[in-house]
Image (spheres, rainbow, N blue to C red):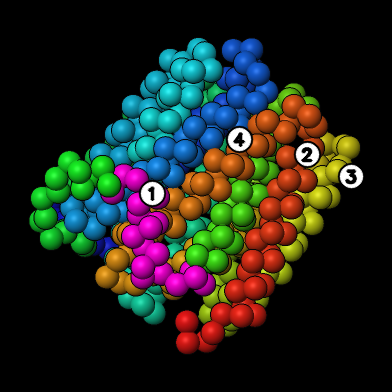
Amino acid sequence: MFNKKSSSLIWFFSFMMMELIFANLAHPATPALIKNLNLPDYTFGAAFAAMAFTNFLFSPFWGKLSDHKGRVKLYMLACIGYAFGQFLFMQATTEIGIFVARGIAGFFIGGINVTHLTYVMDGSSLEDRAKNLTIHSTIFTIAGSLGYLIGGFLGNVSIPLLFTVQIVGLVFSGTVTFLKMKEIHPGDGTHWQMKQLLDASNPFSAFKSASKSISIWVWLFFGVVFFSVYGSTAFDQAFNYYIRDQFGFPPSYNGILKAGVGILALLVNSTICMYLIRKTTMKKPLVWIMGLTAMTGFAVLWSDQAFTFIAISILFFALNSIYSVLIQALAGKESRSDSTGAFMGMFSSIRALGMIFGSLLAGLIYAFGAKLAFVMAGVMFLVALILMSILIRYRPKSE
């Protein structure tokens, strides 16, 4: 298997799916872990925000570094680093310990996310880029669902066992990808000084530098990304904690629900999403999808029974799956081939910024009302809808 390295995206998608399954194992057990440690309710949001914050800070760094040094070796490093972060998470017993562990994990998750996107884009022709990014997004959803399912049942057996399987799996995934995959973009061999590396790790410097070549319309698109990810993360994080806190569901229930969502996402992505990508500009359909997603967030207010809440949530996740594919495909169209890593590093950083606000405020607002986080998610999707409508109406065709 390892005698000859490959640049085939089929191999890469296979390894990516394996890594994502392991990466998602701990999520369904996190609410139970927080409850077992008797930590405050806001911890679930703050812990995810700590991960998203370091992801935001260092995504441009990973993007620029991968442009110069190549994708695959950095991907292996990021997988091993993420495993280390999860080891610290497993050992943590206090809020501070959890926040530090999640912050370390977020630093390396930024590297995984950026190299995922850039390797797929490097290996795709312009004609196939949208299709392959759709496959990427679909795998992301399905693998996440499988990870939730397996992790949920492992969490019922033993949370330390769950983390051990995850840590070993992440190291294995990164290593096997490095051994099999060929560097599509090996870099120019430039040796960076420490100051250059520090500058590259500052997302604000990256944004300032990029503003010279990126139009106001692309910044507006990044605004759409920020607010929609904000809403998506707020709903998802609140959902995970809500079904444990309000209904007492064990980790396996969370896993089963997310697995069902993954199957639904596969059907939606392979039919509706592919049709929209091939037959439309994706922008107007995106507006409608965000509008419907916002409505599901508001609808949670009228869901007092577990069955009603779960049904509304499944509809939200199905719509969210379509939105994720379309927004990522649009990002691929905006990117230039000469700076794919830098652009996707910024895209990943903007997404991480949305995750920070979405998870942190979902955790804080949960203390005032368990359903308020879902309403906040609906509001954020409405803001994204307005920005996307402005982009469609006023952006010159020449842009």
Q: Secondary structure at mark 1?
A: helix
Single out the mark in the foreground, 4 or 1: 1
- Spot occupied by residue 279 in the image (x, y as percentages of width and height): 57, 82
| Up/down of 247 relative to 92, above or below | below
Q: Which mark is residue 203?
A: 1
Residue at the disc numbered 2: 372
Residue at 63% across, 69% down: 388
| Residue contact at pointers 3 and 4, CB within 8 angstroms | no
Give the magenta range.
200-218
Q: Is residue 89 left or right of residue 49?
A: left
- Which residue is drawn at the image coordinates 13% and 60% (left, top)? 188
Marks 2 and 1, Cα distance to the nearest angstrom? 31 Å
Residue position for label 3: 302
What's the residue type where badge 4 is placed?
A: Leu
Indicate which disc, 4 or 1, sits on the residue closer to the N terminus.
Answer: 1
Q: Are marks 3 and 1 in contact (CB under 8 Å)?
A: no
Q: CA distance from mark 3 to mark 2?
A: 12 Å
Identify which residue is drawn at 31% across, 44% down: 201
Real-space Cα separation, disc 2 to disc 4, in angstroms: 13 Å
Q: Is residue 103 left or right of residue 323?
A: left
- Magenta run includes residue 215: yes
Q: Nearer the viewer, mark 3 or mark 4?
A: 4
Spatial CA distance of label 3 from label 1 is 40 Å
